[in-house]
Amino acid sequence: MVLRAEQFDGADLPTNAGRVPKDMAGEREKQRPQDKFTRALKAGKASPDDEVQPPVKFPEGLSEEWVLNYCKKREGAFAKWFEKQNTRADEFYMMYENKMVGGGKGVFLPVSTTVIDTDVARRSAAMFGRTKVVDAIPQFFTENNERVKTVEDLVNQTVVYMTNTTEKGFDAIKTQSIEGTGFFKSFWEIYEEEEITPLYDRDIQTGDPIYSGESQKTETKGRWNWEPVPMNRMLWDPRCMSRIQESPYVRHRDYLTDEELLVMQQNGEIEGVEYILQNEETSDRENEDRERIRQKRIGENEYENAEDGTYAVDEWYADIAWRVPHKDAEGNQVVGKEEMQTGKFHWWIVNGRKVVMFEPNQLVPKRKPYGSFRYSIRPRRLLGRSALDPIAELQNYANRLMGNKQELVKKALQNPTFYERGSGIEGRKTILDEKSLIPVLDANKIKHFPVDVTAIREAKAELADVVAYMRETTASNDIAMGLGGGETATETSLLSQSSTSRFQSVVELTYHELYGALAQECFWSLKQFAQPGDLWVRDSSIDGKARKVELGELQGEYKFTPSGVSAEASKQNQLRQKTVFLERMMETHAKAPQIFVDNEGVQHKFDFIKFITEELMPLADVRNGKTYFVEAEKMLPSSDMLNLARRKMDADTGTEGNNGARQPRPAVTPERVTQLAEAGAQSPAGGPGF
C-alpha cells in the first residue's frame, strides 16, 4: 500500500529540503560518494534526462534526509548493544553444529546437540499434536457462545494449519532453543486456487457416462500466514523489556533482487524502482548479512555467493515524533515557535540510502506485524535465555577434557621407548615400529616408561561428572533421552519430576508467547483483509462439517488465551466436577423432585438444559448447545412413565382449599395418568412435576 500525494491535504504537502541549511547541504553533497548514475553521467554514458526521481511524498516537517537520519541513529545504537548478543548466538550455533568454540584440538563432545534435539523432539510432540491452541475471550456481552465459537474455531484452525502442516513450526522452536528467542513476521498472502472439474458425456446407445475432458477455474484468494525471521535481521528499541510487539520501532532487513523489487512495485508496495536500478549499487561485502557471516564461521558455504546482485531492503514500522512550524488560527506560520507532531508510519529503504515508500501505518489496529517468543525468561530482557546458555562453559570444559583424554590414550597406545645415544640403536625411525626387532649393543641402557592408565581413568570419571551436570542442568537427563542409567529409584523419581516440571514450564511459555501472538495477529488480519469467500470453518474440530464464514461474524474485539497444558488440565478438572454435580442433581430429582422456595415465596427449580448448554458444553469445546436441541415429536407415554405416574398419584394426599379444608385426591383416570406421564416425559430428569 503506497501513500500517494492526493492522500495529503494541500497544506500538508512536504518540502524535501527539510531543515538542512543550504551551506550544510552543499557540504554534504560534496562529501557524498559518487553513485553509479553520477559516474555514468561524467563518463558520457548517460544524460540528466535519464534520471528518474522517486515519487515518495512526506508529511509536513519530514523529509527523506530526516527519515534516513532517524534510521541511522537507531541502527548505530542497536549495533553497539547487540554485538555481544550476536557473538553469543554464533557460539551456540557452533556448539549445536559440533564445532569447537574458540578453536582448540580434540573431539567435540556432542552433549549440546543432544540437548537441543531432545528438547525440540519433546516440545514438538507436546505443541504440534493438538487441533486447538487458544481460547477466544470476547470483549463484548454475548448471550450465547455461537459467535464466539465460530471465531475461536476459525482462528485455531488457521493457526494450526499454518504452523503444524509445514516445517516452519519446527524451525521456529529449534531457533528459539538455540538462540534463546524466536522472531516471526505476520502477513496477508495472496494466492491462486485452481479448481478442476471433470466433464462427462452420455453414451448414445448405453447411456453410460464417458469422460470428455475437464474444466479449469482459477480464483485469486487471500489468507493469513506467518514465517520465522532470523534474529540478526531484526532491530528494535533496546529499552523494550518484554516483547518486540511493544517496541516503538521495528526494522526487518531482507535481501532482494532487481526482479523482486519490480514485483513489489507492480503490487503497489514501493515506488521508484527504476531510480534505484539506475543509481544504487547492489550490496557489497562490507554490508554482508550476519547470517552469512555465521554460516562461514561454522564452516558452511551455502551462502557464499548468495548476496551478489541483491539489494539490502529495510522495512520499518515506527511511532515517530517530529517538529513542525507553529500556525495561528488563520493558518499563518509563527516565526520562532514550533509544535510536536506524532504519528505511526511504515516505510521501505534500499541500501540504507533511498526511501522508496513512506505511508501511515495502514494496519488495524496500528501495530508492528512482528512477534518474539522466548525459551526462558530473563528478567527485564526481551531476549530470552538459550537452552545452551547455562551449560556453555561446561561444554567448553568437557571439550578440553575430551582433548586431554585423547592425547593420553594416543600416548598409551604408542607405548613410547626412550633411549640413550650409547645404547647402539641403529636408525631413529625404528623406534616408531613397536613390533620390529631393534638391534642394540648394550640392552642395559634401554629404558621403557609405560603410561599410567590412572590418568585416563581420572579423565573419564571427570568427563562423566561434567556430562551429568550438563544434562541435569538442562533437564535432558538419561531418563528424558531414553537412555539407560544406573540411578537408584529415588534418584530416578527426582530426576523425572525435575525434568517434567521444567519441560512443562518451557512448553507453557512458548504457548503463551508464540500461539497467543499468532492467534491475535491472525484474527486482526482476517478481520481487515479477508474477502467474501475466503473464510471457511469446520464445526468443533478439523474433521467436522465445513461451512462458510460471513465477514459480519468477525465483528467485535477478542483476546486469545493460549490453552496450554495447565489450562487444559484445569478445564478438564472443572468439567469432571460439573459432570459429577449434574449426575447428583439428576439422581436427587429422580428420587424426590425438589422445588426451592426463597424468602419472598418464589419457587425455583434446577434447569438441566441451561446447565448443560451454558456450563458443560463450552467446557467441552462444543459449539452453542442450544443449536443441538430440536423440538421433540409428541410420543405416547411408555410403560415406565405410566408406572411412575401411578406411583405419583398414589402418593398424592390432596391439597388444601380456600377454607383450609383438605380437598379429596383427584380420581385415578386414564386421562390423569396420561397427563402425568407426559409431564414426566418432558422433565430432563425423567420424573414428573419438575
Image (spheres, rainbow, N blue to C red):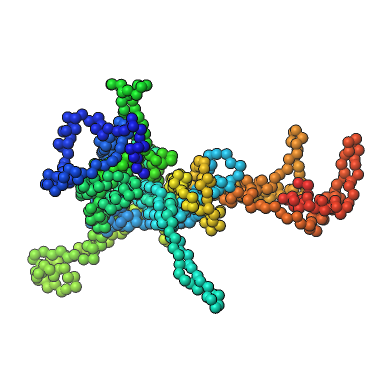
**Viewer can see residue 407:** yes
Q: Is residue 643 left or right of residue 319?
A: right
Task: Name, please, the residue furthest toward the bottom.
Answer: 205
Whether residue 499 appears in this view of the structure is no
Name which residue lies at 41% across and 49% down. 188
Observer-nearest of 575 and 625: 625
Q: Position of residue 340 (x, y in %)?
A: 34, 27
How many numbered discs sit on the rendered protein?
0
Q: Nearer the viewer, residue 392 or 263?
A: 263
- Position in image of residue 535 (x %, y %): 49, 52
- Report x, y in % for residue 64: 27, 37
Percent of width and height locating residue 477: 41, 55
- State the residue at coordinates (55%, 75%): 207
Horizontal side of residue 262 vs 576, given as left or right? left
Taking 495 as reference, is 381 left or right? Answer: left
Q: Is residue 548 above or below residue 238?
A: below
Rendered residue at 46%/51% (across/down): 159
Between residues 513 and 155, which one lies in front from this camera angle?
155
Residue at horizontal 11%, vertical 46%? 43
Q: Nearer the viewer, residue 252 or 654?
A: 252
Q: Quadrant of the N terminus?
A: top left
